[in-house]
Structures are given as structure tokens and as C-alpha cells.
Amino acid sequence: MDGKEALDFGASSDFPSLLRQKDLLGPAAQIGPINKRAEIMPTESTTILAFKFSDGVLVAGDRRATSGNTVVYDRADKVLEIDRHSIMAIAGVPATAWEMARVLEHSFQFFRRTQLQEMSVDGKVRALSKLLRDNFGFALQGIGIVVPIFATYDVKVSPSARLYFYDAMGAQFEATDFAATGSGSPAVRGILYYENTWGKKPLQKISQDEAVVVALRALDTASEADTATGGIDRHAKIFPVMKIVSADGILTLAEEKIAELFHERVA
Amino acid sequence: MIEEPYRWVEAIATRRDYIEMQLATGSPVVALGYREGILLLTVGQQKLFEIYDRIALGAIGHPGDIERLRMAAIELASTEGFTRAAADVSLRRLAYYSLSPVMKNAFEQIYGAPFLARLLFVEIGTSPAGDLFLEVEYDGAINLHSSDGSNTPFAVLAATKKSAEQMAEFLRKRFQSGKDLSATLELALDAWAVGQSKTDEAMPGEDDIRRQRSERLGSGTVAAAVLERNANRAVRYRAVEASELAPLIAK
């Protein structure tokens, strides 16, 4: 906080550009000439998924963080609360992803405080897209790729649950029923598609308990073939992180609750 | 001729009169500690604002100047909170280091425009003893009341010094700690009415306050916001909605 400079500002309502102006955000990577022989970008080693169910959107993520073949951490939290009604789940490089989540969280609050109104859902979705686009140089260099899912609840429209997934360049896609990203996502996408189409009920009609069971089974399946996905650690009793966005806000499911459903219907 | 020291002092005095005149019609702002936190109240246009997780602002003055100062405070707090942590955002530092010197400077640069604004910042602590009430004058002067567990966790902002003194005197007599939101709103409205009464008269009595209050309330809407101590969320600021306000205020 520099006293003299303090009041020397434009009426900025964009938090990332304010940070950049004050030199508090790392420099954007330059997009240089594409080296055709460059190594293929590393995959996003994780599995995150989200789907709409009867109460709102359930977002779940495994807990494993890897570096190459090494498991670095088995209690990573990849499902992050951004504000009272928004969740960002991250697949990709943790350093970049967590920083992005922090910028996003502050951006929404900064907007509310300065503009005296909540940022619209479209504005929030775009804000994340812009962060990804700004990061594209790093993604291209293979050192900072992030592929998130964004789930939120729009109280102004009906149906209110909204779910988006992104590509590394910042393109946003609205999902009608479910989304999954990360290295274990092909299996998860298969399961969710199957459940939604031929299951007893479409995903949007299932209860909260049923939703938790579907998410647990999907993550367990993903971890079966994908070493970068932690799934459920039966020995250390580590369960996926699950959060629900609904009209009431965000609910983080208690580990005991997940454990109970796991033992009853998954194990 | 401004170079002569005497002229400068004179110019500053004139400027002070001018600003006081500009602020003379402002609607008072009252900040009161209550059982669950701190209440901010005023009547009229929107001038209670969220600055950061634990900091709120009430103001009197020109909307354009209030807006510039408010934006500066939000930008400073937000960048600090982002680069470090929310707990490192300090109201003291924001006021003493960032806002006060700039306001003092603008006030004393007599060829430039001063800020036509009086600010009241409130910061909620983990316990009542950690609450902070801080006023910043248009000339950069700061009046800080840390509540320190004493029985005076309140602060006021009024159009004139005399009004502010009367409001403070009224609150010193009437304020009791540990009241609920409804009782505190009542007291805040009474204090607001005291701040609106003519200052050349003696302190109005109980009936006068009530009468003035209902007369003046007719022409404006009550705006209230709270900083809640035990909110489960990081953001402690909450605007009290009109629908929530109506049943709490006795007619």
C-alpha cells in the first residue's frame, strides 16, 4: 500500500488488471513461435467430475497430486469454493490452478464491493475464461496447463443449476447434464453417460445419496486404470472431496457421510 | 500572494468554512456495537459500503469524492488481501498510511480540489475488544476509538461538529452493551434523529426525539448494514434488507 500512489487509479472494476497494474500478478507468458518438435503437453493428471442432480450440482474430485510417476500428496483439494454459489474444480498444474482460483475468488468479491451488485453468472463464466486465455502461453509451453470445471447456481433464472467446462485455451462449454476433466475422465464420462441414459433414472432426477454413490463409483472406476487418480484410498481412509451447489449455497459433504455410503453401496 | 504564510493560513481557513458548508446537509451515520457484531445505520441515499471481509464504511459528503475514496480503500484492501491474507488487511494501516496523507495533501494544496467527504470506517475483531471505529476527516485528521472492552463501542458521523458531539453525548447516556439487533436499531435511529436536530438548541428530550424521528423518517428510507462477528463465512459484512428491517423498527 503506497500512500501517494493509492489514489492514482482509473475506475478499474477488473481485479486481474488491477493486480497487473500494481505488478502483483506474474507476467503473462509470451506465445512464441510454435516448435513442432516440442514434447506433447502433459496430461492433467487427476479426475474431477460434476453433474446436475435433483438438488443442484454435485462436484467431486479425487485427492491425488502427482509429479510424473510420483505421488506427491494424497490429500489435495481440487474442488474449491469461489463464492457462496460457485465452485471451481481443477485439473492441471496445481500452482497455476490454485492461483487462478484465488484470483477468481477475489475478482468476484472485488466486483461486488466496487459495483455494489453481484457479478452475473455470465460474467463469472467469462472471468474464468479470460484467466485461462491469459495463461495460454504457459499452457503451450507445457508448464501451466489448467482445465477446470465451473459449477454455479443462478438464482435469477430457472432451471438454476449451471455447469461449465473449459478447454486449456479458455473456450467455455455449458454442460446440460454432466462434465468431467482430467486424465481419468474418459472412464468417468462413459459411466455418467451410461447412468444418465440407461440408468434407473436420469442424473437430474436422482437424490443426493444416489448422486454421492454415482460419484464414488465413477471415481473408483477412473482410478482403476488411471494411476494419476487417487479414487478411494481404502487403507488410509481417504475419500474424494464432494461439494454441492444449490439455492442454499454450498454444502461440503462430511467425510463420515461419504464413508458411510461408500461402505454400504460401493465397497 | 499565496506564498505569504499568512495568506496560506487564511486560504486554508476559508477552504475549511467552504467544506463545512458543503457537508452541512449530510445525513448522519451511526455505528453501534451490539450482541452479534456492529451495526451501521443512516437514512437516505446509499452510503454504507462493504470495503473488505471485516471492514465497512459509512460516509457523508459529495458522492463523487466518497466514490473515489471508497474505490481506493477497496483496491488497497483487496490487493493486500490477495497478496498476503485477509487477516493482514488492517484498517489502521489503510487509514493512517494510505488515505489520511492523500486527503491532507488534497486539502492543503489550495489550487487543487479537496475531498468533500467525512468517512467512518468500522472493523470487526474476533472479540468486542478488537473492534475498531475510525473517522477520517476531509483534512486527513483521524479520530480512532478502539473499543478496548470499554462500554463505548460506538461512533458517529454528522454534518457538523456540534451535531456529532450531541449524538455522542446521547449515546454515552443511553448505550448499553450486549443488546440485540432490534434494540440497537432503535437506539441508532434515535441517535440519528438527535444528529438531525438543530444544534443551537439544547439536547432534545425523549418525546422530541421520537417526534423528529418519525417526521424525518417519512422523507427517507433507513439503510442499515451489519458486520457479524460469528458469521461462518469470511465476509462479515451484510446489508440489512428492507424486508428484514421493517419488523425490527417500532413505528
Image (spheres, grey):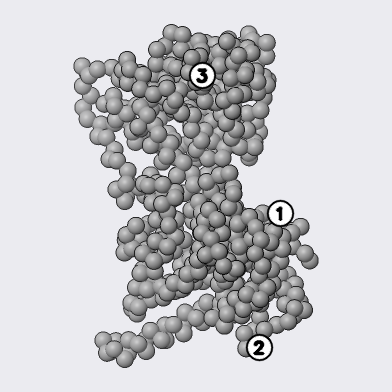
Chain of residue at mark 1:
B
Q: Amino acid at mark 1?
A: Glu
Tag of residue B244? 1
The residue labelled by disc 2 is: B201
| Residue B172, percent from left and from top | 62, 75
Residue nearest the observer in this picture, A124 or B204 = B204
Quadrant location, the C terminus of chain A: top right
Residue nearest the observer in this picture, A145 or B184 = B184
| Residue A243, percent from left and from top | 56, 29
Q: Are the numbered discs 2 and 1 placed on the same chain, yes or no?
A: yes
The residue labelled by disc 3 is: A237
Q: Amino acid at mark 3?
A: Lys
Front position among marks 2 and 3: 3
| Residue A192, percent from left and from top | 56, 14
Q: Is residue B107 above or below residue B220?
A: below
Chain of residue at mark 3:
A
